Each structure stands twice: as structure tokens, then as C-alpha cells.
């Protein structure tokens, strides 16, 4: 794999600033969900993906396995593929293998995690007609760079799988997709994986599993603040909570303070008071209806090209074309 790394601002400084801003909010305290994914958090997310209660990743993978040929048949060639947040790249294999159309295809995973890029190169490096160029970047920065290096006549396919779009608040999801659209040329494609609405008890189980892996994934955010920013959170003083917000049609993860307490975070220069029962909101996972997805796509400047849905775990892969 060829790797393009970015010169970034001090990540610990940015982390400290975001933690400070989120915990000093007057009303609902919050921490950005992107910080759930350090090495421990990413490993826990891999385990979540295998849990019986969390069908999302399996549905995504099943759809790609079953429909890769049908999806690829709707794309032009030559093609360059950019994936926003490739993770290990496991499920992308089905699409890349289906792209064996007698020519070489560049696959550009875009990830802020160096470990994920390495894993992805290891997982997909054996596919003969594919060359991998990894971008250690934020999504839009990486995509702009892929777009800037495209060759004349190449169609760009962007993969945004796993319902990561669901972790954006509405309407930040449209804003983000519009930024993706504005990086593309007319006729380029986006394959968007989204989790669909399903019965609330099923959703709550998916985000509060019996083994407590999702609870550990959530609590690890406090552990990470302790490790990286000199915090003194006692994990046993907090409990994981998953709740469905009907207004936003999302499952929210919170960390609930079991009693009144004050926490100090040295490298964020912060002391924060939490009341008994007060929560820190750490993530929202929005769930969509198929018609809402189309509105979202149109509002962002795409037109509908095809959709594949899973019956076992309602989930959709939607192929969109930039207008
Ligand atoms: C990565 N993302 C789509 C997952 C989700 O379902 O929102 C993260 C996750 N959070 C708790 N469980 C899984």
C-alpha cells in the first residue's frame, strides 16, 4: 500500500479542547463520538459487530456479498474507488473482487486511524487487479485529495458504508453529503449504507447488549480521557445508557453519573461537577426510512440509481449519482 499521511495539528490539543467545550456546556453535557475510536474503542467496536444483538454490520456485509455484481454493473470504467472510514476493509472485498473487469482499479481508503489503514491493506492486499493508496486523513480532506489526483475519464465511486452517516446529527448529515457531492464531478457515484428504523426494543438491545460490550465501548471514552488527558474519572461511578429519541429517530448513548461528583482533567485544565443522574451524551445513531433517504440524497445533490435492502435486519445500500 502507498500511504499518504497528513501533517496535522496536535491531536491531544484538539482532544482537550473538544472535551473542555463539551463538558462545560450549560445544559446537556456531551463528548464527540469520534473519540470513541482509540485502539481499545476500535477493538471493542469490532466485537460489537459480531454480537447477536447488533445485526447492522452483518446486514451491510450480507448486502454487499449478495449484490456486489449488480452494484458494479451500474458503474462506469475506468473507476477509482474512495472509501470514507474503511475500517478493516473486510466487507469492501466483495465489491473490489466484483470489479475484476479486465483493468486495474485504484482503491483509496480514507481513515484517521493508522492502525485501520494497515489492517485494511493486509486484508485487501491480495486482490490482483486492485492497487491500494491509503489516506491518513479526515474524510473530506482525503476525498479532496483523491479527487485532485483522478485521471481524465475516470469515474469516482465513494463508499460510505456501515451507517456511519447515522452518527451525524440531522441536518449535519445533509451538509456532509453536500460537501461530498461538491468534491465530485457530475456522474460520479456514492454508495451509502444506512441502518433503517426497526422496533425500539430491538434497537435498544443492539446498543445495550447482554455481555456489556457496548457499555465498555462507551465507558472507554472516560478511560481514554484519563489515559490521554490526565483525567480522574472513576468508571464504576458511571453507567452506560442507551435510549431512543423519537424526535430525532436515533438511539443515543449516554454515560450516567451514579452520584454527585467533581472530576478533574489536568491536561484540559478542567474541573467539572456532575449531579446524581446527570448524563454525558456520547453518540447518536440515526435510523432512516427508505423515503427519507431519498429526500436526503436529493437535498445533497444526488439522484437515485438503485437500492438494495436486507430483510433480516432492515438496512439499505443506496447507489446515488452526482447530478
Ligand atoms: C459506527 N457506527 C455506525 C456505530 C453505530 O451503530 O452507530 C457505532 C456504534 N455505537 C454503538 N454501537 C455501535
Image: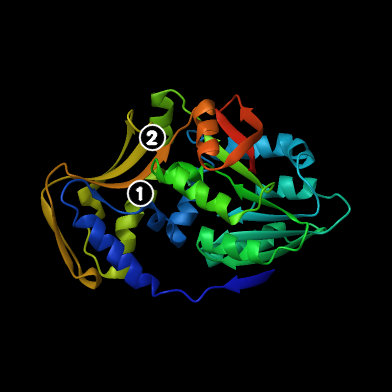
Tell me the SS state at disc 2: strand
Q: Is mark 2 within 8 Å of ligand 1?
A: no
Quadrant that contains the N terminus = bottom right
Q: Which residue is mark 2?
A: 250
Q: Residue at x 51, y 47 (%)?
A: 177
Identify whether 75 is placed above or below 293. Answer: below
Residue 21's x, y, as percent? 24, 60
Q: Is mark 1 within 8 Å of ligand 1?
A: yes
Residue 291's x, y, as percent? 53, 26
Q: Residue at x 73, y 45 (%)?
A: 94
Image quarter for ligand 1 equals top left
Residue 102's x, y, as percent? 89, 53
Q: Nearer the viewer, mark 1 or mark 2?
A: 2
Front-most of 88 and 100? 100
Q: Which residue is mark 1?
A: 218
Left or right? Give the position of 11 relative to 266.
right
Q: Residue at x 49, y 76 (%)?
A: 7
Q: Residues within 10 Å of mark 2 (few under 14, many from 20)?
A: many
Alpha carbon separation for disc pair 1 and 2: 16 Å
Badge 1 or badge 2: first in the primary sequence = 1
Left or right? Give the position of 32 relative to 300.
left
Residue 56's x, y, as percent? 53, 37
Amino acid at each position: 500500500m502507498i500511504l499518504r499521511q497528513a501533517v496535522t495539528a496536535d491531536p491531544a490539543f484538539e482532544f482537550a479542547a473538544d472535551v473542555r467545550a463539551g463538558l462545560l456546556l450549560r445544559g446537556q453535557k456531551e463528548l464527540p463520538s469520534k473519540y470513541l475510536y482509540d485502539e481499545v474503542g476500535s477493538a471493542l467496536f469490532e466485537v460489537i459487530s459480531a454480537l447477536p444483538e447488533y445485526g447492522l454490520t452483518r446486514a451491510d456485509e450480507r448486502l454487499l456479498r449478495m449484490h456486489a455484481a449488480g452494484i458494479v454493473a451500474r458503474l462506469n470504467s475506468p473507476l477509482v474507488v474512495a472509501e470514507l472510514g474503511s475500517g478493516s476493509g473486510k466487507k469492501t472485498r466483495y465489491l473490489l473482487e466484483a470489479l475484476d473487469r479486465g483493468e486495474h482499479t485504484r482503491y483509496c481508503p480514507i481513515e484517521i486511524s493508522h492502525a485501520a489503514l494497515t489492517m485494511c491493506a493486509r486484508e485487501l492486499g491480495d486482490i490482483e487487479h486492485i492497487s491500494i493508496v491509503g489516506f491518513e486523513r479526515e474524510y473530506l480532506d482525503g476525498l479532496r485529495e483523491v479527487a485532485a489526483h483522478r485521471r481524465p475519464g475516470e469515474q469516482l465511486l465513494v463508499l460510505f458504508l456501515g451507517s456511519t452517516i447515522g452518527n451525524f446529527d440531522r441536518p449535519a448529515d445533509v451538509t456532509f453529503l453536500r460537501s461530498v457531492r461538491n468534491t465530485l464531478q457530475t456522474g460520479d457515484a456514492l454508495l451509502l449504507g444506512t441502518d433503517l428504523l426497526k422496533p425500539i426494543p430491538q434497537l435498544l438491545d443492539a446498543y445495550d447488549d447482554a455481555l456489556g460490550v457496548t457499555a465498555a465501548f462507551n465507558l472507554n471514552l472516560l478511560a481514554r480521557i484519563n489515559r490521554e488527558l490526565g483525567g480522574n474519572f472513576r468508571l464504576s461511578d458511571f453507567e452506560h445508557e442507551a435510549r431512543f429519541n423519537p424526535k430525532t429517530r436515533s438511539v443515543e448513548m449516554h454515560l450516567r453519573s451514579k452520584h454527585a461528583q467533581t472530576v478533574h482533567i489536568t491536561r484540559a485544565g478542567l474541573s467539572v461537577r456532575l449531579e446524581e443522574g446527570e448524563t454525558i451524551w456520547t453518540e447518536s445513531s440515526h435510523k432512516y426510512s427508505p423515503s427519507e433517504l431519498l429526500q436526503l440524497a436529493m437535498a445533497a445533490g444526488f439522484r437515485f440509481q438503485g437500492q438494495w435492502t436486507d430483510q433480516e435486519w432492515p438496512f439499505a445500500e443506496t447507489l446515488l449519482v452526482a447530478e
